Image (tube, rainbow, N blue to C red):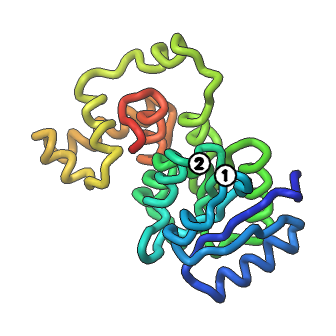
Amino acid sequence: MNNTAKIVLVDDHVLLRNGLAALVTSLGYTILYECSNGRQLIEKLNKNNEPDLILMDINMPELDGFETTLWLKKNYPLINVLALSMYDNESSIIRMIKNGAKGYILKDTDPSELKQAISSVISKGFYYSDLVSGRLVRCIRDDEDDEHDNNKAMLGLNEKEIEFLKLAATEMTYKEIAQQMHLSPRTIDGYRDQLFQKLNVVSRVGLVLFAVKHGIVHCN
């Protein structure tokens, strides 16, 4: 584990951030600086002294975690982002992963998991958690798959299934997807369950990560 790594904290709750800073420091890492929102982070970033990892809250004023993570992906692609949030819903996880986060853990997680998450993101470039399993994360970050493997993985998907995957990557509910596709909710449930089996995933997050990996949908 690279305990000399430089970490930045981005969270608008000062007391929580101070406690997190103390915890991260106790793990042997260096806190480069702290920010209350994405706007402050952008102002402080320096290409001559980039952090190795940013612990990113989601719900913040001025520039939230979703927008900030996407901006980092475009402007500082080598900086790893680990989402640290109170939100455990699928839409938040999907959006953060699509925007470039390399892992996603909850604020009430045990310190030992935080330690493991930081170490894993820094050393491997991703973190396997209960929220986002290793198999699903690999769907979007495994750069070792060649084009042949990607095409092979796409075999067996029909046009309706691909359309469903594209819509599943939005914030629409399954009922809204059914309306958009002019199908019954029961038919949409059938597409979902069939794709779970075909793609060997167990959640909507898994469907979306597969779609991102294989170019069915594109990150913002």
What residue appears at the point 14 percent right and 44 percent down from the top-left corner?
A: 180
Cα separation between marks 1 and 2:
8 Å
Check the image and report above or below for 76 versus 105. above
What residue appears at the point 46 percent right and 73 percent down from the top-left corner?
A: 59
Which of the two discs, 1 and 2, labels the residue nearer the N terminus?
1
Return the residue nearer the eye: 108 or 198: 108
In what element is the residue under mark 1? loop
What residue appears at the point 43 percent right and 53 percent down from the top-left corner?
A: 95
What residue appears at the point 65 percent right and 44 percent down from the top-left corner?
A: 78
* Quarter containing the C terminus: top left
Image spot of residue 213 (x, y percent) = 48, 32
Tag count: 2
Q: Amino acid at mark 1?
A: Lys
Which numbered dot is residue 47? 1
How would you rate the neighbour count of disc 2 (Cα within 10 Å): few for under 14, some for 14-19, many for 20 or more?
A: some
Q: Is the C-beta separation of discs 1 and 2 under 8 Å?
A: yes
Check the image and report above or below for 19 versus 51. below
Left or right of 130, for residue 115: right
How would you rate the neighbour count of disc 1 (Cα within 10 Å): few for under 14, some for 14-19, many for 20 or more?
A: few
Q: Is residue 216 visible?
A: yes
- The answer to which image quadrant residue 130 occupies is bottom right
Which numbered dot is residue 76? 2
Image spot of residue 167 (x, y percent) = 27, 42
Outermost bottom residue: 15
Image spot of residue 157 (x, y percent) = 34, 22
Q: Is residue 85 visible?
A: no
Which numbered dot is residue 127? none
Image spot of residue 62 (x, y percent) = 42, 74
In what element is the residue under mark 2? loop
Q: Amino acid at mark 2?
A: Tyr
Return the residue nearer the eye: 145 or 44: 44
Left or right of 114, for residue 1: right
